[in-house]
Every structure is written in structure tokens, then in C-alpha cells.
Image (cartoon, rainbow, N blue to C red):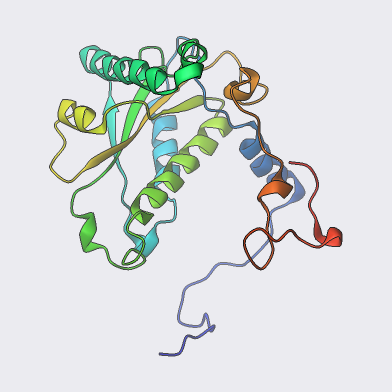
Amino acid sequence: MSETHDLGHYQTIAATPFSQQERAAVYRAIHERRDMRHFVPGAVSDEVLLRLLRAAHHAPSVGFMQPWRFIRVRDCSMREGIHALVEQERVLTAQALGVRQEDFMQLKVQGVLDAAEVLIVALPPGREAHVFGRRTMPEMDVASAACAIQNMWLAARAEGLGMGWVSIYDPQALAQLLEMPQGSYPLAVLCLGPVQAYYAEPMLQQEKWALRAPLQDMLFEERWGQSPAPDQTVGPA
């Protein structure tokens, strides 16, 4: 079947570019977003939390499957259970890192007990029914949910809040703790709340764990490994 480029079938809005100030705000949120681990006492109002959830819910998704579910965790005992699972995996991860074990154990990897809000982003059961865009790439449900998380992250930065994505836990154990149904999957533990300040650069970069690679090292042209022509190279990351 032939594809059409005619938009006449669809409701549309004008393709008006953002103003310079609006563009600057978008790029500022992108470049100042940080994976936060240090939180201060305070609360996130229901109004702000709803704005963040709406931002996440407006993320793109493959086949418009919208594979995100959010579990808000406020119970102290439940948070302590999540914290314990993270601590358990933290030790196992450290052991798996070998020579970097001691360095890893010095890192702060979660804020589950400190953050004003803890949200679990989970994939629902029945995702196999969504074939559009996933027949050859079933992992696109994860990619779509990651887009929702990034939307929330950028919105949180715009609201002056910090957010951290915790992924150090046994997903089966967390699903059991949360009484999630068979076939679902807890993709992320999000810690959200007020912070005293943002890291000037990613925390792991400041801790000398890793450095941001230059963009030009990750940019190929036409085929894998072929660098762009000299007059088409990009500047430093």
C-alpha cells in the first residue's frame, strides 16, 4: 500500500517554532537535568505531581501502546522494603564489579527513604498483544516507558525538583513486594522531591566513575564506524 504525505485527513496545529526564550528553556532543562540522589525535607504538592504525571503520560509510545503504569508509594514500611531490596542488590553489584567494588560502595545510589515522593514505573501485563512496532523489536515497550520517564525528569527540573532513577534491585522481588500481576515488570523506582541544589555535572562524573564521551566519537555517517567528513564534524559534547 502506498503512503501519503497529505495531512488533510488529520486535525493539525500550526508548525510554529518556539521563541528564542522558549527554546532556551527547553535546552536548559535538558542540560541541567540530573539523576539526583540527595534530597531535602519537603513535599511535592498534588497539583505539581499531577503536572509531572501528565507530562509523562504525554510521552510518545510505539503503536500508541502507552505501556506505563505508576505506583505511588507513601507507606513507610513499603518504602523500607524497597530500600532493603536496593541495598541487597547494591552489595551484589559491588561484588560483581571486582576491583571497583570499594569505589562503588562509596556511591549514594538511592534516595528512597529521603525523597518526598517515590513512584514505581511499571510495564503492565498483556504487552504481547501490541504488535504494531514491536513484531521484530519487542523491547520497544521499555523504550516507550523510558520516554515517559524522561518527560517527567525534564518537567521535574522545570518545576525546581530533583528526580533520581533507581534500577538497582531484583525486579521479581520488587514485583512481589508490590503485589504486581503476572506478566508485569517494575522498570524504575523514581525518587522525587525538593533538593538543596543540583549537581553541577552528573554525580558519577564528579565521582570520577565515568566521563561523558565526546559526541563526535558517537557520530557515524552512512555506515557504522565511518566518521563524517571534516567539514561536517560537530563540536565538543
Q: Which residue lies furthest to the front in this view?
A: 99
In percent of the image, x 38 and y 30: which residue is there?
167
- Image quarter in which the C terminus is found: top right
Residue 2 drawn at (x, y percent): 45, 90
The front one of 160 and 143 is: 143
Residue 193 drawn at (x, y percent): 46, 21
The front one of 159 and 68 is: 68
Q: In this view, does 209 lie above or below 61?
A: above
Q: Which residue lies furthest to the right in this view?
A: 231
In percent of the image, x 51 and y 18: which residue is there?
100
Residue 179 drawn at (x, y percent): 14, 31
Question: Residue 13: which quarter of the image?
Answer: bottom right
Q: Going by the image, does 182 lie left or right of 101? A: left
- Image quarter in which the N terminus is found: bottom left
In percent of the image, x 67 and y 42: which residue is there?
27
The front one of 230 and 58 is: 230
